[in-house]
Image (cartoon, grey):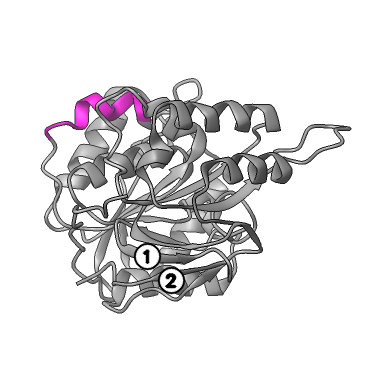
Amino acid sequence: MALSTTRYRVFPALRPGDPVTVVAPASGFDRASFEAGVEVIARRYEVHYDPGVLTRHRYLAGSDARRLGELWRALADTDTRAVFCARGGYGMMRLLAGLEDVPVAAKPVVGFSDITALHQVLQQQGLVSIHGPVLTQLARLDVHTHARLFELLESEAPAADVTGTETYVEGTAEGPLLGGNLAVLTRLLGTPFLAPLKGAVLLLEDIGERPYQLDRMWIHLELAGVFRQVRGIVLGEFAHCEEKNAEYSSAEVLRELAAATGLPCAAGFPIGHGTHNQPVPLGVRVRLDAGSRRLSFLEGAAG
């Protein structure tokens, strides 16, 4: 399988005190968890956000027009040095068509879950971004996770390795780390918004999907040819994905599916909807050693 020839552009390293912007492109959220997350990043940076982030429209953080305008301004703003997403949930996909011509200034965008759709747009444009905690999750995570996030944003050195718990398929693979939430990625198949995956190491994680649903989404990726394109698979946390009273686990289902691909695969990385959610850069070259359950970063996200 050919290596990916895509080279992703790193973002300028942040410094303490830099201005950053918070956006809410997906679901609405409770004010307390949002303000707690803002407090975490405000210890390090000068935080800005529009009061409209607290708006609600059904299950969304305001109308599509409000969320798209806010996100467009934040991505194009040459003064703000980073963009932090308030929450995932659902809604980012509704904005994708409106982002086709956005002039993205070089800066990191931080988020995960539904924000996977935004990461895909950024990787289409050849940009590195950060799969990491949204603000409504951030205050619940430990100080080591906060420190890793700030290090990713501010240091030109490669990120520290991340270690999983299980080897599903032995082997090693190198390539840019791409992907994110399994459910969101499958919804982008067949659209013009899925970033090229050829030669990538694919990151997958999810929450609240029963084993047969994980199976269905995985087979969707298989039928779309994804596993013929990527070089290895990194499985983060699959939280609350068990079938009640079942004699099998979601891990058993995923192990069997991974084995069928023949690709190096390790699981149990503390990435996603669990209690740690270690931030990792998307678009940087990595080396997966599935036998030792180790994901190593070969280049920095910042420059």
Of callouts 1 and 2, the N-terminal one: 1
Q: Position of residue 194 (x, y in %)?
A: 30, 34
Q: Which residue is mark 1?
A: 286
Magenta region's main secondary structure?
A: helix
* CB-based contact (under 8 Å), mark 1 and mark 2: yes
Q: Quadrant of residue 96?
A: top left
Q: Examine the rendered structure and indicate whether residue 161 appears above or below residue 123.
A: below
Residue 8 lies in the magenta stretch: no
> How many C-alpha atoms fall within 10 Å of the one at disc 2: few (<14), some, or many (≥20)?
some
SS at mark 2 in the image: strand
State the residue at coordinates (35%, 36%).
52
| Residue in front for this viewpoint, 49 or 231 | 231
Please state the extent of the stretch shown in magenta in the rendering: 93-101
- Please state if 79 lies on the left or on the right of 170 as rendered: left
Q: Looking at numbered disc 2 in the image, what kind of residue is underneath it?
A: Ser
Residue 87 in view (yes/no): no
Identified by mark 1, the residue type is Val
Q: Dividing the image into 4 quarters, which one contains the C terminus?
A: bottom left
Can residue 80 be spotted in the picture? Answer: yes
Secondary structure of the residue carrying tag 1 is strand
Question: Along the horizontal axis of the image, is 293 left or right of 19?
Answer: right
Label ID, residue 18: none
Magenta-drawn stretch contains 96: yes
Disc on res. 296: 2
